[in-house]
C-alpha cells in the first residue's frame, strides 16, 4: 500500500511541476495546489499506515502497546498545512483576480504590460 501511495505522490509532484511550468496563471495556481496536496500526502505517509486505533490511551487501561496506536503528530501537521494552504489559496486567487482586471488575460507573459509609464 505504501508503494502505491509513493507512486501516486510522485505522479502528483510531476503533474504539479508540469502545471507550474505552463504560461497560464490558472494552471500555475492549480499546480501550486497540487504540490501542496502532494506534500500533505508525504507527511501522512511518513506517519505510517496502520489499521489501528486513535492515538490516545483508553480509560482504565494500565498499559498500551505503542505499536497498536497511530501517531497523531503527522495528522496534526497535515491539519495545520491544510489551514495554511487555504489561506495561501485565498491570497493567490485574490492576486489572480486583480491581475486579470489589469491585463484581461491569463498569460503570464503579459505581466510586463502592467508597468506604469
Image (cartoon, rainbow, N blue to C red):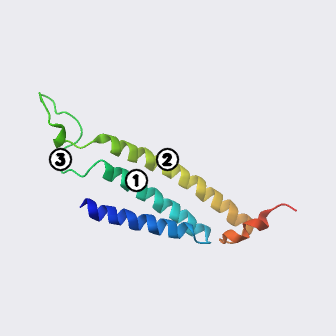
Q: Earlier in the sequence, mark 2 or mark 3?
A: 3
Percent of width and height locating residue 86: 50, 52
Q: Which residue is the site of mark 1?
A: 40
Q: Which residue is the site of mark 3?
A: 52
Secondary structure at numbered mark 3: loop
Number of labelled discs?
A: 3
Secondary structure at numbered mark 2: helix
Up-down relation of residue 91 to residue 114 (above or below): above
Label 2 and label 1: CA atoms lie apart by: 11 Å
Where is residue 70, by image quadrant?
A: top left
Horizontal placement of 115 versus 71: left or right?
Answer: right
Secondary structure at numbered mark 1: helix
Horizontal placement of 79 versus 30: left or right?
Answer: left
Q: Earlier in the sequence, mark 3 or mark 1?
A: 1
Asked whether disc 2 touches disc 3, contact meaning CB atoms under 8 Å apart, the reply is: no
Q: Alpha-carbon neighbours of circle 3 within 10 Å: few (<14), some, or many (≥20)?
A: few
From the viewer's side, name the closer residue of 59 and 12: 12
From the viewer's side, name the closer residue of 9 and 55: 9
Q: Which residue is the site of mark 2?
A: 84
Picture quarter with the C terminus:
bottom right
Up-down relation of residue 22 to residue 90 (above or below): below
Asked whether disc 3 touches disc 1, contact meaning CB atoms under 8 Å apart, the reply is: no
Label 3 and label 1: CA atoms lie apart by: 21 Å
Q: Residue at x 70, y 71 (%)?
A: 109
Q: Alpha-carbon neighbours of circle 2 within 10 Å: few (<14), some, or many (≥20)?
A: few
Where is residue 96, by image quadrant?
A: bottom right
Label 2 and label 3: CA atoms lie apart by: 28 Å
Q: Residue at x 44, y 50 (%)?
A: 82
Q: Earlier in the sequence, mark 2 or mark 1?
A: 1
Q: Residue at x 39, y 64 (%)?
A: 10
Amino acid at each position: 500500500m505504501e508503494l502505491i501511495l509513493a507512486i501516486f505522490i510522485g505522479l502528483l509532484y510531476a503533474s504539479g511541476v508540469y502545471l507550474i511550468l505552463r504560461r497560464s496563471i490558472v494552471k500555475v495556481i492549480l499546480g501550486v495546489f497540487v504540490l501542496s496536496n502532494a506534500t500533505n500526502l508525504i507527511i501522512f505517509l511518513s506517519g505510517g499506515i496502520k489499521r489501528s486505533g486513535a492515538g490516545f490511551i483508553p480509560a482504565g487501561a494500565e498499559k498500551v502497546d505503542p505499536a497498536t496506536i497511530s501517531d497523531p503528530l503527522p495528522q496534526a501537521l497535515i491539519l495545520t498545512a491544510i489551514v495554511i494552504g487555504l489561506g495561501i489559496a485565498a491570497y493567490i486567487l485574490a492576486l489572480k483576480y486583480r491581475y486579470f482586471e489589469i491585463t484581461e488575460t491569463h498569460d503570464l507573459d503579459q505581466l510586463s504590460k502592467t508597468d506604469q509609464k
